[in-house]
Image (spheres, helix red, strand yellow):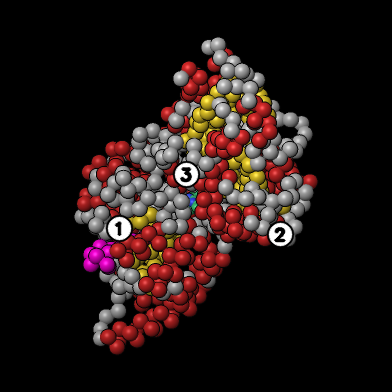
Amino acid sequence: MGDHDLLKKVNFPSDIKKMSSEELKQLAEELREFIIDSVSETGGHLAPSLGVVELTLALHKVFNAPEDKIVWDVGHQAYVHKIITGRKDKFHTLRQYNGISGFPKITESEYDTFGVGHSSTSISAALGMAAARDLLREKYKVVAVIGDGALTGGVAFEGLNNAGGMKKDMIVILNDNEMSISRNVGAVSDYFTKVITNPLYNRIKKDVWDLTGKIPMGTKFVRESVQRVQDGIKTMITPGALFERFGFRYFGPVDGHDIARLVKVLNEIKRLKGPILLHIKTIKGKGYKFAERDATKFHGLGSFNPETGLSKKKKRITYTEVFGKTLTELAEKDERIIGITAAMADGTGMIHLKNKFKNRFFDVGIAEQHAVVFAGAMALQGMKPVVAIYSTFLQRAYDQVIHDVALQKLPVVFALDRGGIVGEDGPTHHGSFDLSYLRLVPNMVIMAPKDENELRHMLFTAVNYKKGPVAIRYPRGEGVGVEFDSSLNEIPIGTSEVLKEGKNAAIISIGDMVHPSMVAAEKLSKKGYDVAVVNARFVKPLDREGLISVIRKVPVVVTVENNSIIGGLGSSVSDILAEEKIDVRFKKIGIPDKFVAHGPVAKLLEDLALDSDGIVRSVESFINS
Ligand SMILES: Cc1ncc(C[n+]2csc(CCOP(=O)(O)OP(=O)(O)O)c2C)c(N)n1
């Protein structure tokens, strides 16, 4: 690693204001080394941040943050922003327990203008700021930075549409690297590629930029005429026609790694009125050969060896892999099974289906709402859609789950990966709410497997269930390490299983909490307590009869779930107790009514007393209270 002579001197944006283009270029290289080195230890979103080093420097040189507002979309690319806004010395704590967040966070820094983690919100947030600014007669600039992937999300278009109509002064920078996590999809992305690779466009691109990229001068009449001609030319031959129709003035595309050019262009457009869109072209993972070669792997990853780019090997198969492989296996036998992902083919394991049955795999872009409606319609027409969406991102499509799928009893399978605490990505990404938010939806079947083997049976059960939607939620990361059964069996809907009998207390547990509950019961038995353990398997329909018969045999019942304590498994068991007037001492263990910070999953679960020792403590003290 170099000496980082320039980076040493940089802590705040004021430190780069006077730097020349040459110095900024050098600083960009130093920043890349610094980030690669640090993220190889902490893990994180490497390739997105490497792609916007020059853009971030240019933005902070030209605009005056924190007065001017820079709004990052998703926020996974904001590492340079963090480093040069007072957090260089804490950067090694990125995503670590008690360390700085992997995403912009308003409580972390005044330079982080809006909390983010989920995609496609930046234009709406920037417009909200611009509207508030004007009402309060303030003067600052507002700049949203959105990726071409994030632009596939509907909310981004809602923001564009509203912004173009409101004509507020604001700038949207489109960071186009042709990648979402995998290659970007959809008509807008195709359109950019087609226009930009068009030979006519390429021949006159430079002249057009020179002609149209400057602020019109002269009298009002000249200005307006020039403007009209410019707009006409641009609409014909630049990729900006789309944005011009949305009421934005379009500039670009500009090489997003040419820092001198970026600074010049930003200085020019900064003074313009109305909604402006600047289109820049960047390379995801720029400057780190492994990330440039495989931007999907380096989009977000755990620790790795910076010399080789190799990640640490996982010990056991992950739930994601088991899901993806089982789905593909099922799809081999049933040609009506199709897979849908909202831009997460790799993250959800759908990639296995894509590799085998390309025409039965649908990447719809970062468009969870659309994914769910699309799946509903597919189901109605006789297909068996399996929609794999991370628990936290299905929140986006809640109304579609209710209105488009459940209300019509459509047999859509929701594979909810990353259910429960997810770790380093933190509160924007924990899947803390799904059991609760799905439980109140009529017609839903909700299950959660105790291990990777049960996940296979649940998926098999789900694709064969015809009466309505089924959600299977499972955690991030490695399975428990159990053997797989040789055949797949349907689990009767709404049945629990008693894993251990006991007379002092019963633990009713679900999903990834079943295994630690069993370990806790063993530890309790060494302390002289005879505790039963039930794997609830279903939150809906709950195994009413089965659970009542267990509950009636013990004086103490404890439910354990890696889900909000409000509205999940514990709440549904407590409903039964009230309805049946069962007199038993009852306690719910789960995620309390707060947003859980980031850190390693094991540590966070320990803090929440959701590890086996925590369960032992809770059960023992409750028995003795
Ligand atoms: C609602 C939602 N769905 C999915 C994701 C997961 N996700 C994070 S970044 C990303 C791709 C973003 O692509 P782009 O905006 O082009 O930025 P790039 O990483 O290419 O710089 C996805 C799908 C998310 N953050 N939010």
Disc 2, SS: helix
Residue wearing tag 1: 69
Confirm whether the magenta stretch covers residue 408: no
Magenta highlight range: 133-144
The amino acid type of the residue labelled 3 equals: His
Query: Residue, x 63% and y 25% (percent of image)?
Result: 552
Disc 3, SS: loop
The amino acid type of the residue labelled 2 equals: Leu
Q: Position of residue 207 (x, y in %)?
A: 39, 75
Q: Earlier in the sequence, mark 3 or mark 2?
A: 2
Q: In this rendering, is residue 85 above or below 201?
A: above
Instruction: Give left or right: position of 117 versus 547.
Output: left
Instruction: Give left or right: position of 337 versus 79.
Output: right
Residue wearing tag 3: 429
Which disc number belongs to residue 380? 2
For the residue carrying disc 3, how many other residues have a C-alpha within 10 Å: few (<14), some (14-19), or many (20+)? Answer: many
Q: Position of residue 515 (x, y in %)?
A: 59, 26
